């Protein structure tokens, strides 16, 4: 077999630096051949090795009394939820593929994260996603392209999730010019399992057979992990072969077959999905984890195309494939289960004790590499950091001085502008394309603060409920990455809290620009440290996650976007709390104070076109106390609805509370010492709007007072069809139908263009 | 009477249907793998939603060739009740057990939401516990639910009470704006001339618990149970 000669040019094309090449020579004791060079290139890409981010990621808290499988140990972490049940969840990005091929990029992002979950032995029961695009309003070529991306990404997510039968229950979508050319697609999946169903991805037991199951290998997605570890440029379109093609039907069969097989734990030693870096990563990681070796024969790998070289087979990222280490003697059991589902199950090799991954074609060795060194001893870089020079200037912004005081009419207009801004507006156009209900456990659907699903006990006990929310305010992070990242954690936890749940753990997706730029790496480090501190404050260990760097094109990098997906637990059905007003005649409370901070706010950005100022302060101790107190009120059964204040502040939150059941509200902000615009739209943290029965107000007041939390009686819900807000001598009065129309029609109106 | 829930590769509402009839309705029920060839004469057959065979070629087009479909045809000829929901409806149309076809939704999008459904024939096995004009809240979740049939057949179906359900607004009017997918004459569900084979796009099996938003679907499943 003739292979290209290893030249400096070829090494560079593989993204391997001179130092890294010397390291490869040291590890092998010789020059690598072409296939081995490819293997090192994908294994040591940022996507697989985290070589730029590892030292920072160690700062995350990863332990806790609910942690059954820790971050980094396996494909996804696992947390105990009681009753012998557990959840496994993770978020992962598919940004680069979605930028060049939105439909397949997003679809395979969903497929990949689902495999991570069922590899753990869990049945995926809920998906979320966190999406970012450039602006979709207007007629520019750029916004047309952004609409095309949004449409393609949503169709891709819907295609995969709907077909495989896992409900997409929530998520977030934000539009900002910093994502022009660099959309973000972060997919989250959560699965449930019994404690005894947890599966590991280790190859152990010398002589145990290695099975390849699922779809055949083709030339798609060649070296996708390496592609994802570069900036996007005009030429990126030529990398389209690096984008995989998804087949959710195949994955559905694979899912069912694997879960059926896992019901026979005696037959399965280890499981590893073939995601990024495909066969390469799975053979090396299983061997590395097992402290063993693996030998496989590529002639036995099911192939979709003829004439594939070892390099192509090893680097293919064809989807819907898994590697299963089977206990010797159970081969026929495995074959018969996969035959029932009409799937390939090929015995391609066996476990050895050599510490090496040896790849053969027939009897010829085409790659012979030490597994542990490749998996664990890759390069690690401590990148240079520098605080961006422009930041201090951008943070300096005196709202009251710079922005003239508006009148009621312009505040009323500003409320409509905010509700109609695609980032804040209803995402119904998007989520109605997702099957939110299949599997019949979705209790709170997209549109509420967090999604809530039911987990039925397998032992006849009461059901438990899981809340989930993914959040990040990229504008906050651009203006102060540490604070912005803390707020991402606080907000995702707050969203879970508002539904009645206790946050128990989380997964992060760190989306940034090119780490070689010290200013970008400063953002990265600040964000990680902020997130880590907040996670410690909430006692929510990070159970895994994903780093996506190089989200950058010649026009610049994205706003730092450290997305936090929080998972919360509720033990009682009665605690499940909606976000919107349920009925007329209830008292509306503002918990956490009037607030005053306007820096980096949605009002500044969406209404005035200004992206400046310091994001609101995040006092973690105060925030945790606030959330615990609201949860206590909910658990006492005193709260009819709870909605947190975030983008757009109190006015937007109140309007949103009115929409679902078309309940009106009359509130009085005359006691607020701030200017009208500040009273309505400030984004100070740790605040929520609650609706409660009026006879509960005194008890609630007493409870909150004992926790040193401000509570203001704002007004009452009614059947007037209007939201009216008294502001001293003036009042703002809007028809809910009109506000709702603005809120609901914004994205559909953009998308018909 | 027992329920038999068919299971094709790519079915994804099979477990939901089984849980609805077995756990909520409390009726005996079993899964029937698509390679099986027998349906018991006592069984009411439920053809669940999903993406059988990935919906490749056309929705439901490949499933009609599954071995179990011969048994379903025999059961239909014996007069047993067959209910296809969503992809199950598509499979029954493709198999020729029901007239018409389901094409891409009018707006070309997959749509998942809870809609209003009016009973237009309450004298069937599926609806006899309800009254004509009753309005139910039941979720839909499909990309190809736009019902089409030639006009002559439609008139014939109307004349024989084969239009069982229509999409309506909350007041029960079958307006165009209440039609989520562009179906001819707002049709959401039909039956065959003999009145034993049913197809509907909305998912009654998803509407069996108030906790999840509606229990209106239970009324239909109860009708099936009390008929037998």
Image (cartoon, grey):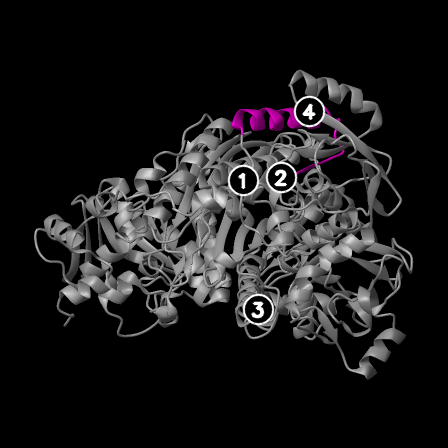
The chain that hosts pointer 3 is: B
| Residue position marked by numbered label 3 in the rendering | B55
Q: Which mark is residue A615?
A: 1
| Residue position marked by numbered label 4 in the rendering | A710
Work out how far the residue at label 2 is from the one at label 1, CA to CA, in angstroms.
Answer: 8 Å
Mark 2 or mark 3: which is in front? 2
Task: Determine whether A340 is above or below A404 in the image.
Answer: below
x then y, percent, for residue B110 = 64, 64
Work out how far the residue at label 3 is from the one at label 4, CA to CA, in angstroms.
Answer: 56 Å
The stretch drawn in magenta includes residue A642: yes
Q: Report whether A694 appears left or right of A368.
A: right
- Residue A41, by quadrant, is bottom left
How crowded pointer 1 is (Cα within 10 Å; few <14, some 14-19, many 20+) is rated as: many
The chain that hosts pointer 2 is: A
> Is the same chain shared between marks 2 and 3?
no
Give the magenta range: A619-645
């Amino acid at each position: 077999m003739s292979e290209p000669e290893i030249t400096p040019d070829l090494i560079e094309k593989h993204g391997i630096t001179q130092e890294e090449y010397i390291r490869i020579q040291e590890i092998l004791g010789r020059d690598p051949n072409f296939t081995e060079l490819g293997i090192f290139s994908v294994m040591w890409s940022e996507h697989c090795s985290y070589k730029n981010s590892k030292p920072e990621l160690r700062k995350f808290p990863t332990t806790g009394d609910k942690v059954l499988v820790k971050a980094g140990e396996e494909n996804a972490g696992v947390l105990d939820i009681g009753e012998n049940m557990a959840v496994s969840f993770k978020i992962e990005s598919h940004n680069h593929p979605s930028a060049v091929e939105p439909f397949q990029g997003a679809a395979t992002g969903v497929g990949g994260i689902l495999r991570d979950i069922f590899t753990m032995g869990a049945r995926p029961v809920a998906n979320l996603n966190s999406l970012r695009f450039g602006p979709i309003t207007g007629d520019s070529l750029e916004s047309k392209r952004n609409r095309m991306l949004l449409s393609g990404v949503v169709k891709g997510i819907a295609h995969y999730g709907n077909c495989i039968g896992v409900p997409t229950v929530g998520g977030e979508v934000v539009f900002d010019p910093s994502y022009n050319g660099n959309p973000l697609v972060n997919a989250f999946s959560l699965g449930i399992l019994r404690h005894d169903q947890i599966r590991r991805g280790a190859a152990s037991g010398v002589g145990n057979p290695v099975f390849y199951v699922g779809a055949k290998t083709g030339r798609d997605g060649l070296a996708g992990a390496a592609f994802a570890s570069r900036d996007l440029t005009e030429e990126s379109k030529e990398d389209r072969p690096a984008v995989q093609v998804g087949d959710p039907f195949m994955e559905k069969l694979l899912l069912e077959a694997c879960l059926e097989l896992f019901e026979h734990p005696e037959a399965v030693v280890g499981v590893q999905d073939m995601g990024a870096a495909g066969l390469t990563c799975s053979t090396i990681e299983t061997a590395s984890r097992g402290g063993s070796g693996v030998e496989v024969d590529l002639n036995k790998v099911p192939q979709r195309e003829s004439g594939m070289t070892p390099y192509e087979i090893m680097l293919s990222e064809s989807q819907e494939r898994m590697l299963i280490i089977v206990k010797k003697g159970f081969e026929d059991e495995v074959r018969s289960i996969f035959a029932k589902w009409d799937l390939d199950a090929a015995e391609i090799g066996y476990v050895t004790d050599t510490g090496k991954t040896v790849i053969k074609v027939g009897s010829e060795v085409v790659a012979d590499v030490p597994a542990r060194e490749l998996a664990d001893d890759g390069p690690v870089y401590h990148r240079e950091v520098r605080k961006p020079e422009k930041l201090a200037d951008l943070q300096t912004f005196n709202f009251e001085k710079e922005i003239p005081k508006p009148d009621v009419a312009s505040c009323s207009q500003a409320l409509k502008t905010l509700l109609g801004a695609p980032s804040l507006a209803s995402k119904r156009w998007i989520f109605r394309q997702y099957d939110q209900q299949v599997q019949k456990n979705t209790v709170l659907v997209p549109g509420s603060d967090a999604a809530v699903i039911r987990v039925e006990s397998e032992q006849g006990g009461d059901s438990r409920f899981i809340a989930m929310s993914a959040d990040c305010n990229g504008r906050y992070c651009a203006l102060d990455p540490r604070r912005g990242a803390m707020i991402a954690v606080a907000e995702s936890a707050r969203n879970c809290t508002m539904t009645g749940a206790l946050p128990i753990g989380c997964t992060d997706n760190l989306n940034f620009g090119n780490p070689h730029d010290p200013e970008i790496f400063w953002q990265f480090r600040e964000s990680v440290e902020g997130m880590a501190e907040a996670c410690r404050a909430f006692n929510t260990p990070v159970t895994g996650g994903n780093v996506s760097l190089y989200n950058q094109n010649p026009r610049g990098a994205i706003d730092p976007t450290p997305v936090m997906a929080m998972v919360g637990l509720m033990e009682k059905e009665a605690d499940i709390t909606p976000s919107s007003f349920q009925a007329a005649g209830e008292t509306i409370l503002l918990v956490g104070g009037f607030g005053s901070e306007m820096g980096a706010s949605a009002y500044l950005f969406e209404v005035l076109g200004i992206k400046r100022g310091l994001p609101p302060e995040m006092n973690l101790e105060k925030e945790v106390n606030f959330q615990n107190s609201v949860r206590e009120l909910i658990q006492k059964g005193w709260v009819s609805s709870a909605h947190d204040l975030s983008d757009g502040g109190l006015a937007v939150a109140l309007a949103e509370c009115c929409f679902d059941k078309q309940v009106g509200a009359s509130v009085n902000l005359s006691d607020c010492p701030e200017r009208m615009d500040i009273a309505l739209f400030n984004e100070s943290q740790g605040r929520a709007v609650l609706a409660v029965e009026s006879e509960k107000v005194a008890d609630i007041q007493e409870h909150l007072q004992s926790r040193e939390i401000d509570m203001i009686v704002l007004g009452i819900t009614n059947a007037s069809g209007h939201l009216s807000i008294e502001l001293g001598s003036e009042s703002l009065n809007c028809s809910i139908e009109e506000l709702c129309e603005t809120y609901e029609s914004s994205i559909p109106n953009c998308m018909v263009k | 009477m027992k329920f038999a829930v068919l299971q094709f590769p790519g079915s994804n509402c099979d477990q939901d249907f089984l849980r609805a009839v077995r756990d909520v309705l409390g009726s005996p029920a079993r899964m029937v793998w698509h390679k099986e060839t027998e349906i018991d004469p006592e069984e009411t057959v439920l053809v669940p939603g999903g993406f059988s065979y990935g919906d490749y070629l056309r929705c439901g087009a490949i499933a009609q060739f599954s071995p179990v479909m011969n048994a379903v045809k025999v059961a239909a000829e014996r007069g047993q009740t067959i209910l296809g929901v969503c992809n199950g409806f598509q499979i029954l149309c493709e198999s020729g057990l029901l007239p018409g076809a389901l094409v891409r939704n009018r707006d070309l999008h997959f749509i998942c939401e809870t809609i209003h459904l009016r009973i237009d024939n309450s004298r069937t096995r599926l609806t006899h516990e309800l009254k004509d004009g009753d309005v139910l809240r039941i979720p839909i979740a499909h990309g190809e639910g736009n019902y089409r049939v030639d006009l002559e057949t439609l008139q014939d179906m109307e004349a024989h009470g084969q239009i069982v359900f229509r999409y309506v607004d909350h007041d029960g009017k079958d307006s165009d704006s209440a039609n989520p997918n562009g179906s001819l004459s707002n049709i959401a569900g039909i039956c065959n001339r003999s009145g034993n084979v049913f197809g509907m796009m909305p998912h009654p099996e998803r509407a069996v618990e108030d906790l999840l938003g509606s229990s209106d679907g239970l009324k239909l499943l109860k009708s099936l149970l009390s008929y037998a």
